[in-house]
């Protein structure tokens, strides 16, 4: 049995992940702003630092995995965009960077970051905005987001935060510090899941009308426990060969809008860079916890 850290553990999909991991016999260190073993406000540098340190103390320097499910949705409010960027991006990457040595100590750790199908369904999010978030230049990102208007800023901040964290996962998952250390870093992108937050939105007639009009080909909403089952699969030995992937579990919404966007063949103008990347690759040495399933 392993030891796992789960943020956003007090409700919704994070709570469902905790229940499933514990029912499987694992030790879970819960992190949330309330009702958790590690109580911390991930919207502040102090809170993120405290959360990172306390988890490391409690796990004694070894984590078999982590699930970063804490997040803030696009509710109205002038300060909401900044909170979204702080929690949804820095609340993931600051903790993972602090926990990376403990994950590497396990030898075959798995990490699941919660992204969203907003990454492919919210339009007009500029690459410069997401790059600014990845560079931790939140003021630059917020200036660009606010140009779109106060009413829409939270939604664009939410989509931008999830694109940025997905790009961060993809870029880091394949590096020596992560894949080379035996850590499998992936993300899951849910659609509309029937969490307390969604139930609250559905209680408002205008919000309910907008949410129900959004295309979900299989119909209805997802169940938090269904997502938790996906997450526990991504934490299992069955996911040893899963690295840098974004798994959409959204009832078909992403495919409805963008069926032909991916996979996409490599364009001629990108071949030189592709070949440079190919030639620069050097295999990472095997880690002590990794088993070779080939053959």
Image (cartoon, helix red, strand yellow):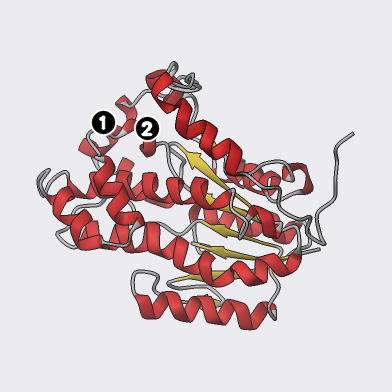
Q: Where is residue 157 in the image (x, y as percent from the top left)?
A: 26, 50
Relative to 232, residue 94 above or below: below
Relative to 113, residue 93 above or below: below
User: Which residue lies at the image location 31% right of the left edge and 55% below the top edge?
Assistant: 133
Q: Where is residue 223 in the image (x, y as percent from the top left)?
A: 54, 40
Q: In this view of the protein, can residue 248 be seen by the observer? A: no
Relative to 275, residue 71 above or below: below
Q: Where is residue 209 in the image (x, y as percent from the top left)?
A: 26, 31
Residue that carries the numbered disc 1 in the rendered image: 209
Q: Which of marks 1 and 2 is nearer the N terminus?
A: 2
User: Which residue lies at the image location 25% right of the left edge and 52% below the top edge?
Assistant: 75
Residue that carries the numbered disc 2 in the rendered image: 120
Work out which residue is located at the far top of the displayed protein and give it. Answer: 260
Q: Residues within 10 Å of mark 1 (few under 14, many from 20)?
A: few
**Relative horizontal placement of residue 93, taking residue 202 as reference (left or right):** right
Q: In which quarter of the image is residue 121?
A: top left
User: Which residue lies at the image location 79% right of the left edge and 55% below the top edge?
Assistant: 286
Q: Tell me the quarter of the image containing the N terminus.
A: bottom right
Q: In this view of the protein, can residue 214 be seen by the observer? A: yes
Relative to 261, residue 278 above or below: below
- Circle 2: element type: helix
- Of tags 1 and 2, which is closer to the observer? 2
Q: How crowded is mark 2: few (under 14 residues within 10 Å), some or many (20 or more)?
A: some
In the image, 199 versus 247, the foreground residue is 247
In the image, 100 versus 203, the foreground residue is 100
Q: Quadrant of residue 215?
A: top left
- Circle 1: element type: helix
Structural distance between the alpha carbons of marks 1 and 2:
21 Å
In the image, 246 versus 233, the foreground residue is 246
Q: Where is residue 159 in the image (x, y as percent from the top left)?
A: 32, 43
């Amino acid at each position: 049995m392993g030891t796992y850290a789960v943020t956003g553990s007090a409700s919704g999909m994070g709570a469902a992940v905790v229940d499933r991991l514990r029912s499987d016999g694992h030790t879970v260190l819960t992190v949330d702003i309330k009702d958790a073993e590690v109580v911390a406000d991930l919207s502040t540098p102090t809170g993120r630092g405290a959360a990172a340190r306390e988890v490391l103390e409690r796990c004694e320097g070894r984590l078999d995995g982590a699930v970063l499910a804490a997040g803030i949705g696009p509710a109205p409010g002038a300060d909401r965009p900044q909170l979204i960027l702080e929690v949804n991006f820095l609340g993931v990457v600051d903790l993972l960077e602090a926990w990376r040595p403990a994950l590497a100590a396990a030898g075959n750790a798995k990490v699941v970051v919660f992204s969203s199908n907003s990454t492919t369904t919210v339009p007009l999010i500029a690459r410069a905005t997401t790059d600014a978030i990845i560079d931790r230049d939140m003021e630059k990102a917020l200036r660009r987001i606010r140009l779109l208007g106060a009413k829409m800023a939270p939604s664009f901040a939410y989509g931008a935060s999830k694109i940025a964290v997905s790009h961060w996962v993809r870029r880091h998952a394949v590096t020596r510090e992560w894949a080379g250390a035996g850590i499998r870093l992936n993300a899951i992108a849910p659609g509309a899941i029937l969490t307390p937050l969604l139930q609250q939105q559905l209680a408002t007639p205008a919000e309910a009308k907008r949410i129900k009009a959004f295309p979900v080909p299989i119909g209805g909403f997802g169940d938090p426990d269904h997502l938790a089952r996906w997450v526990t699969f991504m934490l299992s030995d069955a996911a040893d060969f899963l690295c840098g992937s974004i798994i959409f579990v959204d009832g078909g919404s992403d495919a409805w809008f963008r069926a032909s966007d991916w996979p996409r063949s490599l364009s001629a103008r990108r071949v030189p860079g592709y070949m440079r990347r190919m030639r620069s690759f050097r295999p990472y040495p095997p880690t002590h916890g990794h088993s070779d399933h080939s053959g």
